[in-house]
Each structure stands twice: as structure tokens, then as C-alpha cells.
Amino acid sequence: MDLILKNLNDTRELGEKLAQCCSSLDGPCVVYLIGDLGVGKTTLAQNFIKYFGFARVKSPTYTLVETYQNDNVDINHFDCYRLTDPEELEYIGIREYLTPKSIQLIEWPELGKGTLAKADISIKLSGNGNTRNAKITFQTDIGQSIKECAFG
């Protein structure tokens, strides 16, 4: 599925729409956020997380992972940009983050290849200026259910 995000608000709305559809999932969900620096990966992730009631959302660029938990959800926002080896994810216990009610948002997943869980949804952002292109692939049954919820 290809979308044109005409401005920052469209990116925010996409994050919220996907979060709304993920809010009713029974199992874990893995979302890959792919694209160059500055294309909106973190903005999309932040608005996804804010949908669940977390007011303060920061980028995990320096910490590798930021976790947001409440009674309804367990969100782990990973930024693999600073990885030098995918094995570093094993050292932080990457597999332990994938729990039954968890959602993983993973920026720069290509740098964790072979260690990360398979994506349910991959979102590849590209473009410059105000306009972004979002190429979304829904790769599993969970992904397909999110697609139906968000886009009919």
C-alpha cells in the first residue's frame, strides 16, 4: 500500500490510526520503520505511542530502547541506528521484550537483521520537504487485520 503524507500532520495521523488498530490486538505486534534520517520515523512512532496515553515520548537514539507500559499495553520503541553488530540486541535481551501484549516499533531494522522478530507491518518512509511517501506492507495475519481496521 502506498500513501502520500502531505505534511507533518498526515504522519502524526498515520501513527495514531495504526495505534488505534493495534489497541485491540491479543498478541504481540512488530512494526518496522524504515527510511533515511529525517523522513519521519520517530514522529510516526511518537504519535503511535502518544495514542496510548503516554504524554512524554522521547527518541531511543542513545538508549537503544524506550519502554512504555500501562494496564493495556507494553510498547518497546527501538532505534537500531547506533548498532555496530546485530548481536548487541541479544545482549539487551531483545527476545524478552516480545510478550503477549507487546508492540515493538523498530527504527532502522535492517541494522538488526537476523536478530529481530519478523515484522507484522513494515513502513518505508521516503521523500523530502513536507511531502513523504509511505510504502506499507502488511506481512502477517496480524498485519492484515491492522490493514483492514485502518484502511478498510
Image (cartoon, rainbow, N blue to C red):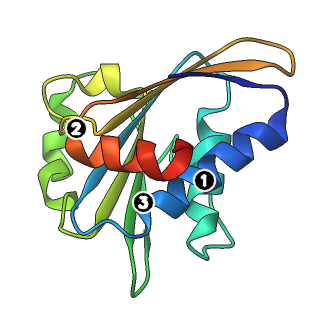
Of the image marks 3 and 1, the number of the one nearer the N terminus = 1
- Mark number displayed over residue 17: 1
Residue 151 image offset from top left, x and y in percent:
54, 42
According to the picture, the residue beneath numbered tag 2 turns out to be: 140
- Give the tally of numbered discs: 3
Q: Residue at x 40, y 63 (%)?
A: 75
According to the picture, the residue beneath numbered tag 3 turns out to be: 22
Of residues 51 and 78, the one nearer the viewer is: 51
The amino acid type, in three-letter code, at marker 1 is Lys
**Left or right side of 48 for 122:** left
Of the image marks 2 and 1, the number of the one nearer the N terminus = 1
CB within 8 Å, label 3 to label 1: no
The amino acid type, in three-letter code, at marker 3 is Cys
Residue 145 image offset from top left, x and y in percent:
34, 49
**Left or right side of 142 for 49:** right
Near mark 2 (Cα within 10 A), the count class, few <14, some 14-19 or many ≥20, is some
The amino acid type, in three-letter code, at marker 2 is Thr
> Which quarter of the picture shows residue 86?
top left
Near mark 3 (Cα within 10 A), the count class, few <14, some 14-19 or many ≥20, is many
Q: Residue at x 81, y 19 (%)?
A: 131
What secondary structure is marked by label 2? loop
Residue 20 image offset from top left, x and y in percent:
54, 63
> Which quarter of the picture shows residue 103?
bottom left
